[in-house]
Amino acid sequence: MNSLWWLALPTLLLPIWWHRKKRVQVAAEPLASARFLPRTEPRQMRVWRWADVILMIVRCLLLACLIAWLADPVLPWRGNTVVVAEGTDAAWVEQQAAQAGLEDAARLPLPAAEALSWVRAHEREWKPNARLLVLGDIPMPATLPQFRHALELRTLAKPAAPREVHVAIVSERAGEWRRMFAALDGPLRAVVDAVPGAKTELIVWDKPEAPPPSMRAPLWWAANTAAFPELAKAPGVDGIRYAGSARGRLWTSGAWPPGDAAAARRLLETWRSLHYAPLPHAAPAHRFAASNVPATQHADGALRDFLMMALVALFALERTLTHARRR
């Protein structure tokens, strides 16, 4: 639909019309004396003259740039391309490009999280017969994307390393807490430290005496609320009461330590979902067939940016010339 803006090109006639002035001239004949001539009406003729030619040209260029910017022109100039997710092993990239027959294709490094969406937004920049190969661990998109060009995605398929979370347990029932954290699997792996330190993200406090004022941690599990007066009137959700303090966020529950595997699993899942963002799953290798999906509108590009800069410059020049003419 943006190409319909080219139909507005006839508006370039408006500055031409404005800068043409009609000047009335009287056609007179020089005579020695008009005493003996009969009375006649003077003959007049209209003559067109150009006015402010430079300003007229600038205004025509300004309208032309505005129409071209609204029409969003994109010239296909990219050929065969290998899109490489940032951080991908270079030797593996060259091996896969050689297997696909794209040794001489251009390399386009992009952030892994934006690779497929960037290609989809700028797809009009590729020639119709261009081949696209995407290499690297790309996060799984929410829906299967569609492309106007045939595209192949190849991944390393390396499992993500679990994140280590340092936990300190201060309790006379430390064995029960350790067994619960030992069963933690998935993207988190608990490292139980003997004493809290600078890396500690969770402190399990199961003693009636209060911890030292200098001890800090992002999260505390208080199995004994006598040490934390902030939890006296704390609100609760799903059996867990919570409150803020100068030492960090406080959680407590009357059913701690968990008495069975289901309760321990619920506690660990609640902790993982509220305090740690989920790790994205890498998309599997896939071949995307060419489809007739409409092109993305208003894609950023060098030509569109150049037209915007030219538009700003011509507008400033037009205002300057208009002010100078009035003076």
Image (cartoon, grey):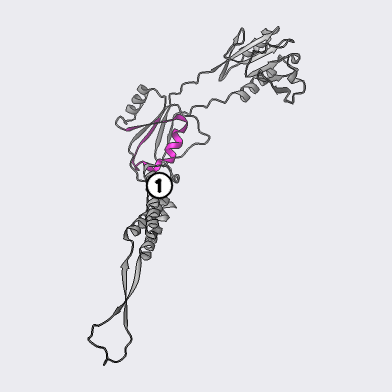
Residue 306 position, x and y percent, is 37, 45
Q: Residue at x 32, y 38 (%)?
A: 79
Count the labels in the image: 1
Relative to residue 229, is residue 108 depicted above or below? below
Which quadrant of the figure has residue 259?
A: top right
Q: Secondary structure at mark 1?
A: helix
The verdict on residue 225 being magenta is no
The residue identified by callout 1 is 308
Residue 272 position, x and y percent, is 61, 22
Q: Residue at x 42, y 55 (%)?
A: 5
Which quadrant of the figure has residue 289?
A: top left
Relative to residue 67, is residue 154 depicted above or below? above
The verdict on residue 121 being magenta is yes
Relative to residue 21, is residue 240 depicted above or below? above
Would residue 314 appear left or right of 197 to someone viewing this image?
Answer: left
The foreground one among 3 and 25 is: 25
Residue 258 position, x and y percent, is 71, 15
Residue 159 position, x and y percent, is 49, 20
The foreground one among 79 and 237 is: 237
Q: Crowding near pointer 1: few (<14 within 10 Å), some, many (20+)?
A: some
The stretch in magenta equals 105-134
The foreground one among 34 and 23 is: 34
Which quadrant of the figure has residue 55?
A: bottom left
> Could you tell me the amino acid type at mark 1?
Met
Would residue 251 appear left or right of 87 to someone viewing this image?
Answer: right
Quadrant including the C terminus: bottom left
Q: Residue at x 38, y 46 (%)?
A: 309
